[in-house]
Amino acid sequence: MGWLVLAYLVLYTLPRITLSLLQIRYVRLKSTKPPIILEADDYKLAARYAISKQKYEVTEHVLNFIIFVVWIFFGLNALEHALSDLNLSTLFSAWLLVMIFFVINAIINLPLSILELRRDKTFGFSNVTSHIYLKDTLRSSILFLVIGGIIVILLLLLMKYFELWWLLGFVVLFVIALIANLIYPTLIAPMFNKFTPLEDETLKDKIQNLMDKVGFKSSGIYVIDASKRDGRLNAYFGGLGKSKRVVLFDTLLNKISTEGIIAILGHELGHFKHKDILKNIALMACMLFILFAIAGNLIYPLQKHLGLVMDDGIFLSLLVLLMPVLTFLFMPIISYFSRKAEYSADRFGASFSSKHSLYQALIRLVNENKSFPYSHPAFVFFYYSHPPLVERLKALEED
């Protein structure tokens, strides 16, 4: 298993740590320059937050590598040995191994999650109380275990009875992902937040007229009580098919003008008009397909060829451990197409209000969210789904 550890280190841990260190150095350098977009104090605050976030990321990557090594050389085999003494059926034992693996990972990562929350509260972004955090953690954990448990048993059954299990597994997981997107706005999201119909009739009519112009049919326009968790601003179109809905953060309504909101929603509708959602689904499908193809045609046959005895539960747990590596390698491709789509959506959004309205709305978003306006080019290349604001504003001025 040493080659897996080396691959994880070289392809994932070291590149991510390097990117974080580059970003820290770049932000520190830029923070000494005259501020742009943000006021001087907010500019310094945004820089400190960006640096703090990347320090946290470095710590997380180091710990994740240690956890990966422990699982590979000790944890998974110890877990399998413990379950073998229970005389369970092969299928149930494999399922239980993966589920216990999930639970242990969640417990291990809990301190990091708490540290991240404390960081956001320190910088004034998070409004999450201990009560809300405990409820969110419990609900999300139960939801994950239920859905994850169903997916795991389906994959184990496919591995047991079908030669082309990896192809069928890809189809099953892709369909489940589509269903999750379909039911998220109406069934899952309301478990965590309260959604109320937009009461501002003037704004509601303008949003409806905007949607009518591009043929976007929604199940309603809602305001989400985002302020009880976070002070930052956002708006989005959620769901697929008839479950599509417009969601405005309550923080957005208090900080952005009506024209600014129309410009922002026009931007989001640009993604709908240009079929960016379908393109993202296609990219996700490609990534899933490659993951399963590698698992079914390379890793799984390789361990059999080498005579390695690997329980199906251990094999699935390995796939979960290795999935971040593939996701990271795919990230520049996904980020590139996403950034390209953002420029087109900006032009589309500006056409429904004005360049000035969108320009000012984007600046207000950055000011309220305290986003540092600069990032290292390599960091942008890998991680940024949206172009840096400086480039977006420049593109708006040139169009």
Image (cartoon, rainbow, N blue to C red):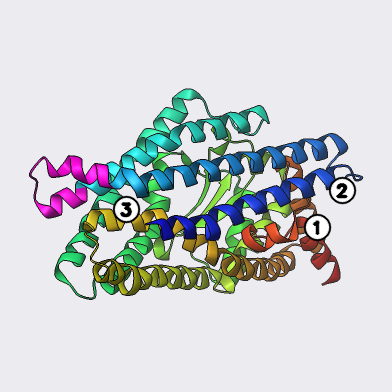
Left or right: 304 as drawn, with respect to 73: left
Q: Earlier in the sequence, mark 1 or mark 2?
A: 2
**Which region is colored magenta?**
77-95
* Residue closest to the eye, 160 or 67: 67
Identified by mark 3, the residue type is Ser
Residue occupying the point 56% across, 54% down: 236
Q: Residue at x 59, y 74 (%)?
A: 274
Identify the residue under disc 3. 317
Which residue is at 54% across, 73% downward? 275
Q: Secondary structure at mark 2?
A: loop
Dot 2 corresponds to which residue? 36
Three-letter code for the amino acid on which mark 2 is drawn: Ile
Q: CA distance from mark 1 to mark 3?
A: 42 Å
The secondary element bearing badge 3 is classed as helix
Q: Residues within 10 Å of mark 1 (few under 14, many from 20)?
A: few
Q: Which residue is mark 1?
A: 390
58 vs 304, left or right, is right
**Relative to 208, does residue 31 appear above or below in the rendering?**
above
Q: Residues within 10 Å of mark 2 (few under 14, many from 20)?
A: few
Q: Nearer the viewer, mark 2 or mark 3?
A: 3
Image quadrant where residue 152 sits? bottom left
Q: CA distance from mark 2 to mark 3?
A: 46 Å
Q: Position of residue 151 (x, y in %)?
A: 27, 56
C-alpha gap between disc 1 and disc 2: 9 Å
The N terminus: image quadrant: bottom left
Q: Which of the pair 175/18 is nearer the observer?
A: 18
How far from the left and from the top, in percent, is residue 104? 34, 38
The residue located at (8%, 51%) in the rendering is 89
How many marks the image carries: the answer is: 3
